């Protein structure tokens, strides 16, 4: 299966040697190695030095953005669904020194504090069949883009501008839209959701969203008044709250109390806006808020499903780092970061496809086991059906 996946993007390489080494690199990324860097991947391949692996990430001639598109297309083919969800988030890569492209002291959720690190912005795809990372951008701080000599030393092209993580998110969403990726919703945490021009941008493209936002964010109500989201939620009656599960988590079902309130008049295209609230069952003062947009017939449980799907990108980061070496690279230059990250995303997509195929086989096996009961005339239907 891995060789078949490799054949999909083999044409992205100008020469046979890096083309073959890309397959070896991916096989190493999903192998049970304690560390996955140039040395360990080379040793697994029976090579006495990491020069070949380093060349693959450095001087070799290949189309890394083309491979990124192949990752996306493979994910769509294996776990795609019309009601899929696109999820944006960023993750940190802890680094030493000052030479790695885009590195600086900055807050990263990876460490939970400000550390010397690089930060990547990612787009994930989630459906009932699985989840996987499909796009990526390296965040290059303004302190870097204002110093073009430093950028050139790290391989950052002059045409790379300063861009916020929110702008990265829109770039990646636009690429997914242009590629015809099947999806129904977009979600992200409040670092992205609180930016109102992102919400406007999505509405202009008719894209439904459930975006977390800060407690003091303001929205326009049906009476065209600007109010805070926490004020709207505080005024809801007790019966507006429904206890619903956002799906299974690492500690069982993720059950919260949920409520929503409609805002703004219904648009001519049949879409509506809501503020969604999630309240902790154990601590009623712990409330998260979401700005939402979508078809006017959208139900509360539909919005809950999308809001709860955001965890899928966190799970993708965890699996990609633990199983595919996403964060175990030793490259410093800008092109090398994209090359390693893209191959790690490809390895992660392969694992997601394997899991989806195994789940499908399990469902087919259960169906076959149920067959004899029907052939024997046993009534297995639920009462009333």
Image (cartoon, rainbow, N blue to C red):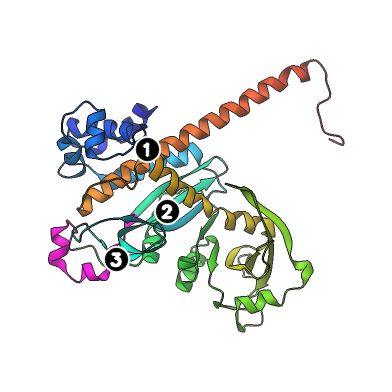
Q: Which mark is residue 251?
A: none
Q: Are marks 3 and 1 in contact (CB under 8 Å)?
A: no
The CA span between labels 2 and 1 is 16 Å
Q: Quadrant of residue 292?
A: bottom right
Report which residue position mark 1 lands on: 347
- Frontmost of labels 3 and 2 is 3
Please, is residue 290 above or below residue 217 in the view?
above
Give how far across and how far down residue 16 sits, in percent: 19, 30
Which is nearer the N-term, disc 2 or disc 1? 2
Report which residue position mark 3 lands on: 105
Between 115 and 57, the one nearer to me in the picture: 115
The CA span between labels 3 and 2 is 24 Å
Residue 299 visible at all: no
Q: Are marks 3 and 2 in contact (CB under 8 Å)?
A: no
Please, is residue 362 above or below residue 277 in the view?
above
Q: Which mark is residue 123?
A: 2
Q: Quadrant of the C terminus?
A: top right
Q: Quadrant of residue 48?
A: top left
Element under disc 3: strand
Residue 47 placement, left or right of 349? left
Range drawn in magenta: 137-157
Which is nearer the N-term, disc 3 or disc 1? 3
Element under disc 1: helix
The CA span between labels 3 and 1 is 29 Å
- Frontmost of labels 3 and 1 is 3
Element under disc 2: strand
Which residue shows up at 65% across the image and 74% down it? 265
């Amino acid at each position: 299966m891995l060789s078949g996946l490799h054949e999909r993007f083999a044409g992205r390489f100008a020469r046979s040697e890096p083309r073959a080494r890309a397959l070896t690199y991916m096989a190493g990324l999903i192998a049970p190695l304690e560390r996955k860097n140039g040395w360990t991947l080379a040793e697994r391949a029976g090579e006495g030095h990491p020069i070949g692996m380093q060349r693959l990430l450095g001087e070799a001639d290949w189309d890394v953005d083309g491979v990124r598109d192949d990752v996306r297309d493979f994910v769509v083919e294996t776990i795609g669904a019309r009601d899929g969800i696109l999820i944006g988030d960023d993750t940190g890569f802890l680094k030493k020194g000052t030479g790695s492209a885009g590195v600086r002291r900055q807050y990263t959720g990876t460490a939970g504090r400000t550390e010397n690190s690089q930060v990547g912005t990612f787009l994930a795809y989630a459906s009932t069949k699985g989840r996987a990372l499909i796009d990526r951008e390296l965040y290059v701080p303004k302190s870097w883009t204002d110093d073009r000599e430093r950028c050139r030393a790290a391989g950052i092209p002059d045409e790379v501008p300063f861009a916020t993580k929110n702008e990265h998110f829109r770039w990646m969403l636009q690429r997914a839209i242009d590629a015809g990726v099947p999806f129904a919703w977009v979600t992200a945490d409040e670092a992205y959701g609180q930016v109102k021009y992102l919400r406007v941008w999505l509405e202009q493209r008719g894209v439904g969203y459930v975006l977390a936002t800060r407690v003091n964010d303001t929205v326009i109500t049906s009476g065209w008044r600007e109010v805070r989201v926490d004020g709207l939620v505080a005024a809801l009656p007790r019966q507006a709250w429904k206890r619903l599960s956002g799906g299974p988590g690492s500690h069982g079902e993720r059950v919260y109390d949920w409520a929503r309130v409609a805002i703004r008049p219904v648009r001519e295209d049949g879409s509506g806006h809501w503020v969604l609230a999630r309240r902790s069952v154990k601590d009623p003062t712990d409330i998260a808020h979401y700005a939402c947009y979508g078809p006017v017939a959208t139900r509360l449980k539909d919005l809950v499903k999308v809001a709860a799907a955001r965890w899928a990108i966190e799970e993708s980061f965890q699996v990609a780092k633990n199983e595919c070496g996403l964060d175990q690279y030793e490259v410093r230059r800008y092109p090398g970061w994209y090359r390693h990250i893209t191959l790690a995303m490809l390895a992660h997509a392969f694992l997601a496809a394997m899991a989806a195929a195994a789940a499908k086989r399990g469902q087919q096996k259960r169906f076959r086991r149920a067959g004899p009961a029907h052939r024997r005339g046993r009534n297995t239907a639920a009462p009333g059906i």
